[in-house]
Image (cartoon, rainbow, N blue to C red):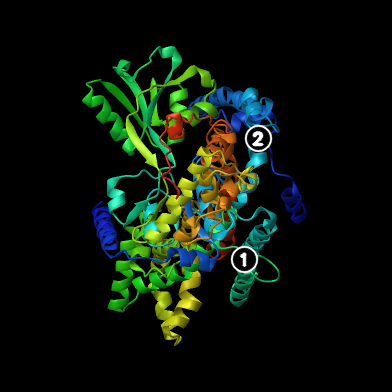
Amino acid sequence: MKSRLWGAALAVTCLTMFAGTAQAGPTLDAVKGRGQLFCGVNAGLPGFSNPDSQGKWTGLDADTCRAVAAAVLGDANKIRFTPLSAQQRLTAVQTGEIDVLARNTTWTLTRDAQGLNFAPTTYYDGQGLMVPKSLGVTSAKQLDGATICVQMGTTTELNLSDWFRTRNISFKPVVIEALDEVNAAYFAGRCDVMTADISALAGTRATVAPKPDDHLILPEVLSKEPLGPVVRHGDDQWRDIVTWTIYALMEAEEKGVTAANVDAKLKDPDPGIQRLLGVQGDMGPLLGLDKQWAYRAIKAVGNYGEIFDRNVGKGSPLKLDRGLNGLWTNGGLMYAPPIR
Amino acid sequence: MTEIVNKAASLPPHRPRLGLWAWARANLFSSWYNTALTLAFAYIAWLVIPGLVKWGFINASLSGDAAACRAAGGACWSFIAEKWRFILFGTFPDDQQWRPTLAMLATIATLVISADRRTWGRPLLFIWGGGLGFAALMMFGGVLGMDFVPTGLWGGLPLTLALSVVGLGASFPLGVLLALGRTSDLPVMRGLSVVYIELVRGVPLISILFMASVMLPLFLPQDVPIDKLLRALIGITLFSAAYVAEVVRGGLQAIPRGQVEASKALGLGYWQRQRLIILPQALALVIPPLVNSFIAIFKDTSLVIIIGLLDLLSTAKSALTDPAWRGFYKEAYLFVGVIYFLFCYALSRYSRHLETVLGQGRKR
């Protein structure tokens, strides 16, 4: 135990040292030089990054990286995915082992301040509660005395007890080691309620539940979990590139540019689309890229809406609603600053 | 007289009639507690087996998608049919998967050949160099028209084998040296060995892997990236060497002092003494615990999941996260479990065989 503490102390010291000495790193040159983007992903999170049967990485996070590779290198396949565990992911960004981390990482002050920078959020998640409809509950406030299955040692457990304690609602936690086992325990009826991130709950309901219609995700959101790509602190140019590639995908959705119609849209009279696709203006060169950067990203993976639908939305087994992740014009939070 | 004796000796021994009932009485119902145990196990089998057969065979689906599987309600072997390549080979480019297949065959062949005692000695070095060199060539590629495949794309069984075979191969000599160091008369050697062994044995493998993968890069300059696989290999080697050392020390201490004195009297130097007299006897003595720690390390390699290496167990877990195929844990773990079992069982059978062969000299 003592050695663990020492290790942790040492790790913290190292992190702070790095935060202090982080310097402008020529990530763009490095990526172009090796002709490959190094992208860190989760070893398996359904819909966000998971390998398919051929070993190809799929998911919203994987496609975000592909968009960056297409924008920077001109080819969405010039990319190497590195599966990372939760513990090692931030170190991997700081040490330059990877160029972009797209691994369902929550944007927090602590992380942002300690040697990392966050690109725009690509998925607004939050902790939620799922109950069987047979329970007849429609709000978390009716859960007094309920047993709740929760994963061990995560912020999920902490958020849960905080939320219920501040509202003076009693509950009995059933703490379980792994998320799979939480699912199993919930469906076996060991607890009345199951808590996890809403995307995970919806995914579980759609793909693991024996009868998806028998379960309800309650409207209360226990915590904010904005998930987005992470880059190293100190390389502003690289951060801009990742940031604006994501904005370009959102802008494309807003302007109705898709992977299928992007070539036709090159002739579109809308100056916004012309700037986005590099027909006029010098948007790409300002970032250190060429004029066609956004065109290639959209052509490779589609606009943000397409990526969402294909991986986690209606076109996927997870069937998540757009909700907060809709465009701002539809009441969501996806809002790209003007590209001009 | 002699004739009679011979005749008596050639008579077959008396054998009780071997019926099913007689066998059962002798083996299953020989006493009241054996009877109770038999009945208890029969009851458990009666409870478990019908359900297992129903799940694994009668209601099982061999083809079709996940929905068809869930509808059938039994084991979803089509999940394995869909995912076996990913589970076995991970993210290795799928049009190149003949390469890890050859690499694994070469590795297994190397192990099988070196299991034969006739190859022990100098030939073993060539066999291992050749076999593992060929395996590495297949995995890395980059020559003879094969694409270079970085270790970051390795996964599944080849990765598990690489970690355990290379880890064990490197840790065995290191462990023997450490054991010799710990039993040495030189105080500095002894002290260093003791400190190393106790330090490493005092921490769990998972924290060594964690240190190797998370802490090490922070101390190194950024343009010296050490391969993730290499970091894990170093961690596993250093870890298992400490355990091998303790096992070997047990063997060394079991050798009577007279052996050392006799070999000294013959005028043998320290290394000659160890190589010709002491170690052959000591190692033969400790084969069972040695294989035991090898089996443990083979299974411990699955801990590399915490540093994001996709070994056999991790690929099975990753395969389960495909949104189209979720929830088939039993099938995935059973599949991987069978593979682990085959390797561990083969190892343990081989150690039994070695024990009998090498134990001949001690039989009275």
**From what the image shows, is residue B292 above or below residue A34?**
above
- Front in this rendered view, residue B50 or B302: B302
Q: Is residue A169 left or right of residue A117?
A: left
Q: Which chain is disc 2 placed on?
A: B
> Which mark identifies residue B77?
2
Q: Which chain is disc 1 placed on?
A: B
Q: Looking at the image, tell me whether mark 2 or mark 1 is earlier in sequence order.
A: 2
> Which mark identifies residue B148?
1
Image quarter hosting the N terminus of chain B: bottom right
Q: Is residue A244 left or right of residue B80?
A: left
Q: Which image quadrant is residue A139 in? A: top left
**From what the image shows, is residue B57 above or below residue A101?**
above
Element under disc 2: helix
- Front in this rendered view, residue A161 or B283: A161
Q: Which image quadrant is residue B51 in? A: top right
Amino acid tagged 2: Trp
Element under disc 1: loop
Q: Position of residue A55 (x, y in %)?
A: 60, 49
User: For the residues tagged 2 and 1, is the chain the same?
Assistant: yes
Q: Position of residue B163 (x, y in %)?
A: 52, 59
